[in-house]
Amino acid sequence: MKHADCVPKTKFDTAAVARAKAVGFPALDPVVPDLLPWLKDMNWPVAPALAELLTQAGPVIIPSLRSAFASDDAIWKYWLLTELCPHLAPSTLIVLSPDLKHLSMHPTEAERSEHVDQAAKALPA
């Protein structure tokens, strides 16, 4: 099975998520940057199961999370901070603590309106 088979093609592609779960980590390491955007809306059918799966990614998820935190998508940041980050290993959160501190202390207007700063403050990092 190719890694691409484990990345959803649409928000309804739960079969790809099932394949990803079957493959697991570390085999999915190369596609973490492709999986994370599927958490942009936790109402999408693929999102909850992918969030659960991505909690198992380990440190390989850090660059992708940093990239997401640097984006202009405040809603995505909120979903990551509330649905994924609370379930990451403490060692991963410690590495992300500068990013979380920045989000909590220097939010943009969009981040403030989406409560990104509050979600970042709520994490134990």
Image (spheres, rainbow, N blue to C red):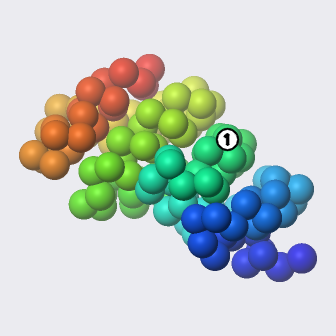
Mark 1: few/some/many CA within 10 Å (<14, 14-19, 20+): some
Q: Position of residue 83 (x, y in %)?
A: 51, 36
121 vs 73, nearest the viewer: 73
Residue 124 lies left or right of residue 113; in this view the side is: right
Q: Position of residue 7 (x, y in %)?
A: 68, 70
Is residue 70 visible from the viewing direction of this image?
Answer: yes
101 vs 41, nearest the viewer: 41
67 vs 114, nearest the viewer: 114
Mark 1 is on which residue type?
Glu
Q: What element does badge 1 sit on?
A: helix
Q: Is residue 28 above or below residue 107?
A: below
* Residue plotted at (33% across, 31% down): 120
**Residue that mark 1 sits on:** 52
123 vs 14, nearest the viewer: 14
Q: Position of residue 65 (x, y in %)?
A: 46, 52
Q: Position of residue 12 (x, y in %)?
A: 64, 64
Q: Is residue 35 above or below residue 86?
A: below
* Residue plotted at (24% across, 40% down): 114
* Residue plotted at (73% across, 60% down): 14
Is residue 27 visible from the viewing direction of this image?
Answer: no
> Residue 2's image quarter?
bottom right
* Residue plotted at (68% across, 47% down): 49
Residue 28 lies left or right of residue 65; in this view the side is: right
Which residue occupies the extreme left position in the image? 109
Q: Quadrant of the C terminus?
A: top left
